């Protein structure tokens, strides 16, 4: 780990002026829910007792930290995106911080330093809060907004896994539709633009926007201060802080509340308009369109009656606000929709009065997703970044605008400084939503969103090579948007990943992870082609085959208690003892093929020993480059890694180019290295290849052992792939 990570234009540099590649992992998804009581999202008991929870032991116990960090180090990761939530800090009420959780966080960060990780802090949220179907904010924030989370189920103000009647049948990925349901529409609108759209919403003499943002930023500053005062964590290993995870605009910019916005590409289950959500949130029955998500995106399936039977998602008028010590302004009435109080609709006649209420700012400026980012998001980001850097002077600020939106236009302004990073997210949406790796076709989603095609039909990419190139080109385009709008700063994709429970958990039944390997390799191919840093989503210590990541049915963890870790040589599922990657243990662990494209091959295997697609994510990578990377990539099919660089001068003896070269693919006695010049040494025990080279353009090629047939041999055809992925089909 560099003693002090610097930024030189779009590159990270160490103290020897070598280019540093951030190859990171999100650690860990367990941090989304509390330890006491232990409340993964499929557990209903004690769910609403949100004031009396503890996250001590998240993301894992201090005593177990060495197991997880050793494992992640052996996989080649040098960076941790450290997941934590506002709820973990301040669950009991405004200004009441959990100092014990902070103490354990500091202890875990010290362990990360022992393992030479660079760490940046991720204030994580998904659809605002656990109580609105995700993670992040404390329960009391919803009460502060006048909302009643215990009524979200009946009103469908949010779809919450913890309260779903049959949690095992919770529809896959439906949690993300909560962004378009009432609770989130209210929360994000008030958080970012309460002053403009809800001026009556005043609490403790502040508009709800200022109250919520003030409490949020104060909590982050408190944690940053404790980390600084620890005395041995700032800059090394904690290199910086990210802005709030996946911010959302709520209703800001909606042109018509009684229609679905054109830019809303996700619809699944009931899909209410904002107007319908207001009505059901106020106890009215509505017939709402239903949708599902298929291989080409969402499609309408029918209608469903949502009847709350008079139950409102708003706190009753008699609610005792003294519970959290705040004083609500008399002009903000409980028991009534906040938008009705601002004249958006008439609850007496159930008439929509101002369908375009959220389409313009207070100054008359027309609002869109783009103006939301440049106006409301940036207003918040400026205050947050200034507050964090007032504590952590050298903090690298990872700026994360709304997902897949154009980044803020701030190039050349004082918002951009020499310790700023553009931190977008990207997921292959078709694979994520359908939980299938379709090798036949995919869609250029970013191109569709940016209007590059006359019709979405023209955005379809046919064949696996075209799909891989399309993923690469989308990441490259996102990176370029950062350069164009923010300026010459590094780009790090702080979330990217794949679902492991593809094909109805076929891999868990057979040990055949071929779909996961192909999907994971395609994502890494895209990252390498775009020359972007990343933090893969995700590492989850409690992942298992039944509940996945223990949260909303997601299953994206590269580790599972029910699968063999790459280094584990035992017949039982992976345990903490099997953490190091070495040639002998891997030879034993990979002794049986589970990657053949022929599904029938697995029937002849006596004992399947899965590695959870480690073939694709435990891969070689530059770590320190004495020069500038021209191109770098790993060809999994050929087990060949290539790095081309341009060096301004010959390498110093003490600071060569260093590569992560895992014995997984490159056993010491079965590895060939070709260089354009200079000398090299391969320390297989440490998975490091060092290369001393001259100035100018240089190239190194490392060839290892192809352990399994992936792309070679006879490929399955289109009909076979469709039959396997989509069941019986007929050709007309």
Image: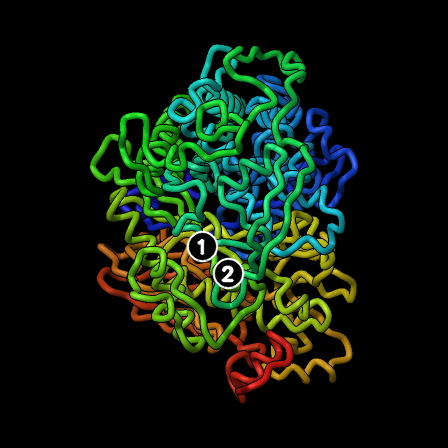
Q: Quadrant of the N terminus?
A: top left
Q: Are marks 1 and 2 in contact (CB under 8 Å)?
A: yes
Q: Residue 320 at x, y = what percent? A: 67, 14
Q: Residue 446 at x, y = what percent? A: 37, 58
Q: Residue at x 59, y 35 (%)?
A: 281
Q: Residue at x 65, y 81 (%)?
A: 599
Give the colour scheme shown. Answer: rainbow
Q: Residue 689 at x, y = what percent? A: 45, 61
**Secondary structure category for the residue under label 2:** strand
- Give the numbered dot on residue 298: 2
For the question of whether residue 727 can be seen, the reply is yes
Q: Does residue 561 appear left or right of residue 69 in this picture? A: right
Q: Does residue 428 appear left or right of residue 150 in this picture? A: left
Q: Residue at x 30, y 47 (%)?
A: 482
Quadrant hosting residue 593: bottom right
The front one of 333 and 667 is: 333
- Residue neighbourhood size for the residue with mark 1, other residues' Cα within 10 Å, grouped as few (<14), some (14–19), many (≥20): few
For residue 184, above or below residue 666: above
Question: For the residues marked 1 and 2, what is the alpha-carbon distance in whole angstroms?
Answer: 8 Å
The front one of 476 and 535 is: 476
- Give the numbered dot on residue 265: 1
Disc 1 or 2, which lies upstream in sequence? 1
For the question of whether residue 22 can be seen, the reply is no
Q: Does residue 460 appear left or right of residue 201 in this picture? A: left
- Residue neighbourhood size for the residue with mark 2, other residues' Cα within 10 Å, grouped as few (<14), some (14–19), many (≥20): some
- The extreme bottom residue here reads 714
């Amino acid at each position: 780990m560099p003693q002090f990570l610097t930024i030189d234009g779009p590159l990270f540099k160490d103290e020897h002026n070598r280019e540093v590649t951030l190859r990171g992992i999100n650690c860990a998804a367990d941090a989304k829910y509390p330890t006491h009581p232990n409340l993964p999202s499929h557990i209903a008991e004690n769910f609403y007792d949100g004031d009396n929870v503890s996250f001590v032991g998240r993301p894992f116990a201090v005593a177990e930290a060495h197991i997880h960090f050793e494992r992640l180090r052996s996989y080649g990761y040098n960076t941790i995106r450290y997941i934590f939530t506002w709820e973990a800090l301040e669950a009991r009420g405004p200004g009441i911080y959990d100092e014990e959780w902070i103490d354990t966080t500091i202890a875990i960060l010290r362990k990360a330093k022992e393992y030479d990780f660079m760490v940046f802090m991720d204030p994580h949220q998904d659809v605002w809060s656990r109580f609105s179907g995700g993670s992040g904010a404390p329960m009391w924030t919803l009460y502060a907004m006048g909302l009643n989370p215990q009524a979200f189920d009946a009103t469908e103000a949010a779809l919450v896994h913890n309260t779903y009647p049959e949690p095992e049948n919770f529809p896959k990925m439906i949690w993300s539709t909560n962004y378009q349901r009432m609770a989130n529409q209210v929360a994000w609108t008030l958080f970012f633009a309460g002053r403009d759209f809800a001026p009556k919403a005043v609490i403790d003499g502040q508009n709800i926007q200022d109250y919520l943002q003030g409490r949020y930023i104060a909590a982050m500053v408190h944690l940053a201060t404790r980390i600084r005062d620890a005395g041995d964590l700032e800059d090394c290993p904690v290199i910086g802080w990210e802005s709030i995870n996946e911010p959302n605009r709520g209703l800001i910019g909606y042109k018509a509340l009684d229609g679905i916005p054109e830019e809303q590409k996700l619809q699944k289950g009931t899909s209410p308009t904002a107007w319908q959500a207001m009505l059901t949130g106020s106890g009215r029955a509505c017939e709402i369109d239903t949708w599902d998500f298929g291989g080409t995106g969402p499609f309408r399936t029918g209608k469903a009656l949502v009847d709350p039977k008079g139950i409102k998602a708003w706190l009753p008028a008699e609610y005792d606000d003294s519970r959290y010590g705040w004083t609500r302004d008399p002009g903000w009435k409980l028991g009534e929709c906040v938008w009705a109080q601002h004249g958006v609709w008439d609850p007496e006649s159930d008439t929509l009065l101002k369908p375009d209420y959220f389409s313009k700012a207070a100054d008359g400026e027309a609002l869109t997703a783009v103006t939301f980012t440049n106006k409301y998001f940036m207003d918040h980001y400026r205050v947050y970044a200034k507050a964090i850097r007032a504590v952590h002077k050298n903090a690298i600020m990872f700026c994360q605008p709304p997902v897949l939106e154009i980044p803020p236009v701030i190039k050349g302004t004082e918002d951009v400084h020499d310790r700023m990073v553009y931190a977008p997210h990207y997921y292959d949406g078709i694979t994520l939503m359908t939980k299938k790796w379709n090798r036949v076709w995919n869609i250029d989603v970013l191109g569709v969103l940016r209007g590059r095609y006359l019709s979405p039909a023209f955005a379809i990419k046919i064949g696996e090579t075209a799909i891989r190139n399309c993923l690469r080109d989308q990441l490259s385009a996102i990176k370029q948007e950062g350069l164009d709008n923010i300026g010459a700063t590094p780009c790090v994709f702080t979330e990217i990943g794949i679902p492991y429970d593809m094909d109805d958990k076929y891999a868990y039944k057979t040990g055949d992870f071929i779909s996961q390997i192909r999907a994971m390799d395609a994502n890494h191919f895209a990252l390498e082609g775009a020359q972007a840093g990343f933090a893969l989503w995700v590492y989850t210590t409690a992942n298992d085959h039944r509940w996945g990541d223990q949260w909303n049915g997601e299953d994206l963890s590269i580790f599972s208690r029910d699968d063999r870790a790459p280094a584990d040589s035992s017949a039982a599922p992976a345990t903490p003892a099997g953490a190091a990657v070495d040639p002998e243990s891997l030879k034993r662990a990979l002794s049986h093929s589970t990657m053949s494209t022929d599904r029938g091959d697995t029937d002849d295997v006596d004992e399947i020993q899965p590695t959870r697609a480690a073939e694709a994510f435990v891969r070689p990578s530059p770590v320190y480059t004495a020069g500038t990377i021209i191109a770098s990539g790993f060809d999994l099919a050929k087990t060949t890694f290539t790095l081309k660089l341009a060096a301004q001068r010959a390498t110093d003896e003490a600071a060569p180019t260093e590569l992560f070269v895992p014995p997984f693919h490159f056993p010491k006695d079965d590895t060939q290295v070709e260089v354009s010049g200079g000398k090299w040494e391969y320390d297989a025990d440490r998975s490091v290849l060092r290369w001393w080279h001259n100035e100018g353009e240089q190239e190194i090629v490392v060839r290892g052992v192809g352990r399994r047939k992936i792309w070679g041999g006879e490929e399955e055809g289109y009909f076979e792939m469709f039959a396997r992925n989509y069941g019986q089909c007929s050709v007309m």
